[in-house]
Amino acid sequence: MARNQNRMALIRKVHGMIDNQDLEKHRHSQDQVGALLGSSKERAIQSVKIGEMDGEWVSVNRVHMKKYVILYCHGGGYSTGSSLYARILTTKLAESTSMDVLCFDYRLAPENPYPAACEDAMKAWDYLMLLGYGARDVIVAGDSAGGNLALSLVHKLKQQKRLLPRGLVLLSPWTDLTSSGKTHETRAEADPVLDAEYLERMIHNYVGTKEVKDVDLKEPMISPLFGDFSGFPPTYIQAGDNEILLSDSVMLHERMVQANVSVKIDVFKGMWHVFQMSPFKTAYDAMEKNAEFIFDICR
């Protein structure tokens, strides 16, 4: 118990060094951390342009699987984050799966509010299709707001009657911008990363200059939890039991079960929001579980 409390205090301190209400400083700090922790001779990073959008391919420097690819949506509350910051996760995914990972720098709020990120996710998807991948060759993954974006992308593909990806991998997904889940209250003291004030700020940035009360936050492209999941691909969800967004994952799992989606959720005891970024054994174990799920659906 004491060990976990010490760990929570450490995570709170580290996160506090990155978090900044000045978005430019926050973004810069994240990129510095990503450059520091996401680089290694064992990985190959290749920059790519998708129209006007930047992105990068992350691969392992060894013989690896080319048939399947992972499209990764980075987190950051839709206001921060980048493919550089996401390297902390994309490199682990590439290593554990031996698959290439494409991460893209969608436009960020508040400069580019909804639906800019959703439009950019579709551009990244179409880019993979132009490269010759089929929908069934792609696993879409994302953390936090990136989990929201991954779900929104599949909702949009379904809406357009297009083929859907082979599977979804979601790390602490932010699925409900109405913040209706009970863990927003029950985990408020425990969560070392997120709080209500931060989420409110991110929501306001994302929906634009309009008053939040004038926006339907239950619109499935904003809060994917409220969409129709019938026909969705196999999905694997991971969350920490000390995060205020735990309910977002649990409710998503329930909605998907009701829609007969092949879905699994793992809630990791003592863990926090997107704990997979941390250099702890549990984080590496979680990445191995992501790889097992991906291998299973790619058989």
Image (cartoon, grey):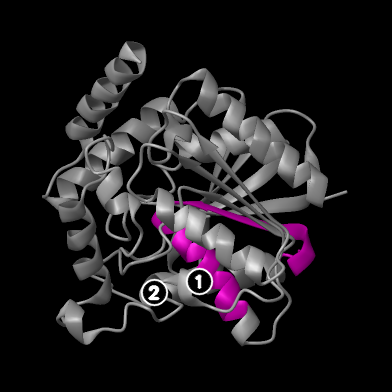
Q: Residue at x 80, y 41 (%)?
A: 65
Residue 147 magenta-highlighted: yes
Residue shown at the point (43%, 63%) measured from the top left: 175
Residue 190, magenta (yes or no): no
Q: Residue 194: percent from the left, percent from the top? A: 26, 45
* Residue 19 image point, x, y percent: 19, 41
Q: Toward the viewer: 41 or 28?
A: 28
Residue type (three-letter) at the residue carrying disc 2 = Ile
* Mark 2, secondary structure of its residue: loop
Q: Is residue 127 visible?
A: no
| Residue placed under numbered mark 1 in the picture | 152
**Is 147 positioned to the left or the right of 199 in the image?**
right
Disc 1 crowd rating (10 Å Cα; few below 14, some 14-19, many 20+) is: many
Q: Which mark is residue 222?
A: 2
Q: How many marks do you count on the picture?
A: 2
Question: What residue is rendered at 14% in x and 81% in y?
Answer: 211
Whole-angstrom CA distance, mark 1 to mark 2, is 7 Å
Residue depicted at 35% across the width and 18% down the height: 4
The reply to whether the C-beta atoms of the residues labelled 1 and 2 are less than 8 Å apart is: yes
Q: Of 202 and 25, which appears nearest the observer?
A: 202
* Region rendered in magenta: 131-157
Q: Nearer the viewer, residue 129 or 22?
A: 22
Instruction: Give the image location of residue 119, x and y in percent.
Output: 46, 76
Look at the image and tell me in which quarter the N terminus lies.
top left
Secondary structure under badge 1?
Answer: helix
Front residue of 152 and 256: 256
* First in residue order: circle 1 vs circle 2: 1
Above or below — where is 223 with respect to 241?
A: below
- How crowded pointer 2 is (Cα within 10 Å; few <14, some 14-19, many 20+) is rated as many
Amino acid at circle 1: Ser
